Amino acid sequence: MRSHLLNDTTAERYRRSVTEGVERVAAKLATTDRPFTGVTVDALAPRIDRIDLDRPLLDEAAALDELEEVYLRDAIYFHHPRYLAHLNCPVVIPAVLGEAILSAVNSSLDTWDQSAGGTLIERKLIDWTNERIGLGPAADGIFTSGGSQSNLQALLLAREEAKSESAAELRIFASEVSHFSVRKSAKLLGLSPDSVVSIPVDHDKRMQTVALAHELERCERDGLVPMAVVATAGTTDFGSIDPLPEIAELCAQYGTWLHVDAAYGCGLLVSVKRRDLLTGIERADSVTVDYHKSFFQPVSSSALLVRDAATLRHATYHAEYLNPRRMVLERIPNQVDKSLQTTRRFDALKLWMTLRVMGADGIGGLFDEVCDLAQEGWELLAADPRYDVVVEPSLSTLVFRYIPAAVTDPAEIDRANLYARKALFASGAAVVAGTKVGGRHYLKFTLLNPETTTDDITAVLDLIAGHAEQYLGESADRVASATSVAS
């Protein structure tokens, strides 16, 4: 089986195998006419269940044929313009090229003696991002697996910097629409269930700074420790951006760590039109960015940035076999000294290739396009009597709800919207997301594909209305039938 190892003797086989795989994917991309086939779990699971992993096919072409059957045919394709659901972006080709290279070379970014140039490339990209944010000359950071890990590490640093003798005294302040990873991180860090204080939001789903000031004052009055404020630059549900300058002022006043979760909104760092929406982020102590959202990178590609490189020491542990203390004195750059992970992929290469081929303005232009599209979509929804749209978008998210003219029961409207989303997904014609606003079910477009047009949005809105009306018609028929039987 040595013939399957990638080395100098198998380079030609590697070229042929990867080329065949790329050809299969390229053919699929070229012929995909909808984001999803609509396959159900009950239909797909038996195909995978009947595969005996202890009986290999011993042939790559056969394995690719099988993969077509169990994955490629029914994958959900984010590149399709009517995939409008979650924070999944179509990816740019230079990043995919980087992915192919990093997978084959397989560098591990934990130590210099496993990565060499990879270490320096990652560090250069961290410095570049910090310059874009404006964190200052002492800033540093590390690539992570995603926003949840970045938020966890940021709050770990904040906990240690708070220097409290009792974890029960620590409090984290985040808006009521902040990412769930804030509460999850608090639990993982051993904080009390009531350690995360939820701050109400305004009509535009932005943290109310008056309410934050009140809670910080109460925290101090009660003898508790304000460990961190988590401001969000691009909430998952609404794309809303908290008032960063005002929050930064409050954090300075109370000596509180300011973390900005810009996992979604980090695309503004390269925006030509909207960079000012991030004004105030430069005052953060830590920032989360997800390049695999608004920088059009393949998963995973994320980073945690910090104002003061020294705070990363709270994640530093030394092992003699890996990164002994003497290496610090020898100025050997081991990235594991900053990371929660040990073995870590060279995900930075994807962003490096993208910047070297497209440039920052090229990425920012794509993100500006989807933000412009969201504004046009909001105007369509606001003018459509069939729909109630929640807020005007700051980024590229639209949250709305189908409102039938003849139905006033909110619960029945909920069921119609839920049915419409499910039926649309089952049809495969489009994929949309859902959420709750004020306890009611709403639908959500997350627009991250510059190929999506207003015609696509209009068509999907018509499909949603059609499914909702079908449900309401069938529901009315059921009620009429039951009434007839009862009488």
Image (spheres, helix red, strand yellow):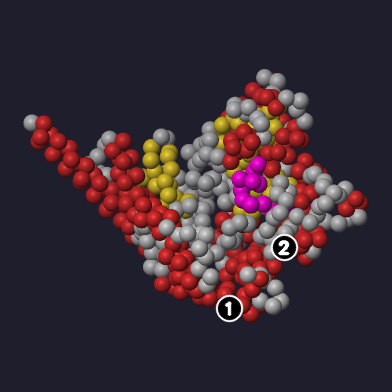
- Residue at 80 percent of width and 44 percent of height: 317
Residue 443 spot, x, y in % from top left:
39, 47
What crowding class fits label 1: few (fewer than 14 Cα within 10 Å), some (14-19), or many (20 or more)? few
Question: Which residue matches tag 2?
Answer: 107
For label 2, the SS is loop
Of all residues, the one furthest to the bottom in this rendering is: 12
- Residue at 76 percent of width and 62 percent of height: 115
Nearer the camera: disc 1 or disc 2: 1
485 relative to 209 in the view: left or right: left
For label 1, the SS is helix
Q: Is residue 129 above or below residue 314?
A: below
* Boundaries of the magenta span: 137-152
> Quick one: label 1 or label 2, which is nearer the N terminus?
1
- Residue at 69 percent of width and 78 percent of height: 9
Q: Which picture quadrant has residue 44?
A: bottom left
* Relative depth, front residue between 368 and 292: 292
421 relative to 238 in the view: left or right: left
Residue 446 spot, x, y in % from top left:
47, 53
In three-dimensional space, the C-alpha distance between marks 1 and 2, rounded to whole angstroms, equals 22 Å
Task: Say if residue 357 shows up in the picture.
Answer: no
Q: Is residue 51 above or below residue 280?
A: below
* Relative depth, front residue between 251 and 32: 32
Question: Which residue matches tag 1?
Answer: 16
Is 145 included in the stretch rendered in magenta? yes
149 relative to 417 in the view: left or right: right
Q: What is the quadrant of the C terminus in the image?
A: top left
Residue 342 spot, x, y in % from top left:
73, 51
Residue 408 spot, x, y in % from top left:
26, 37
